Image (cartoon, grey):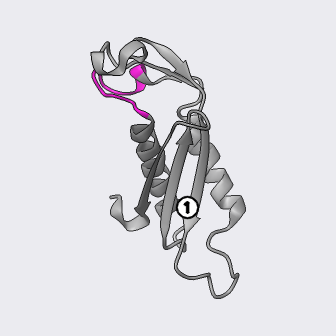
Amino acid sequence: MIAHSFHNNPRFGPAGTLHGATYTCDVEFLSGALDPETNWVIDIGKASDIVNQVLKKYNLKNLDELYPKGVMTTTEFMAKQIHDDIQKKLKKECKDFHGCVRVKLWESHRAWGAYTGRVNEIE
């Protein structure tokens, strides 16, 4: 659950002013091969911990206060931010993961945004 605005930008219509959104967040950990020792892509417990840590940063927050004035915190933007935060944690806490992460944020069954990237793309 977040609050945000689109800084009265007319292209966003009534959503341009401060409003709330409740997202459902799906995170996929993708790989072209399984770990030879464990036959997994990633330890599900570690993956769950990382996702929970990242989502706490945004839950019940006003995104207008987290990002500089004028940043359009669209669903797609937030999917990329969550993705980048997960990637950074993976590099520190799960060095044996080699693959991609896809974050999909659902605003409703008809509206969503997603972002996918490889672990080594984030510095």
Q: Position of residue 24 (x, y in %)?
A: 62, 38
| Front one among 65 and 34 | 34
- Label 1 crowding class (10 Å Cα cut-off): few <14, some 14-19, many 20+? few
Residue labelled with disc 1: 93
Instruction: Report if residue 9 is visible in the image.
Output: no
Q: Is residue 48 above or below residue 40?
A: above
Q: Amino acid at mark 1?
A: Glu
Tell me the chief SS of the magenta region. Answer: loop
Kindly identify the residue that appears in the image at 54 percent across and 68 percent down.
30
Q: Is residue 76 left or right of residue 105?
A: left
Q: Is residue 92 left or right of residue 26?
A: left
| Front one among 43 and 115 | 115
Q: Position of residue 15 (x, y in %)?
A: 42, 17
Quarter of the figure that contains the N terminus: top right
Q: Position of residue 86 (x, y in %)?
A: 50, 52
Task: Give the magenta range.
Answer: 64-74
Q: Quadrant of residue 76?
A: top left
Instruction: Report if residue 35 is visible in the image.
Output: yes
Residue 66 within the segment the image draws in magenta = yes
Quarter of the figure that contains the C terminus: bottom left
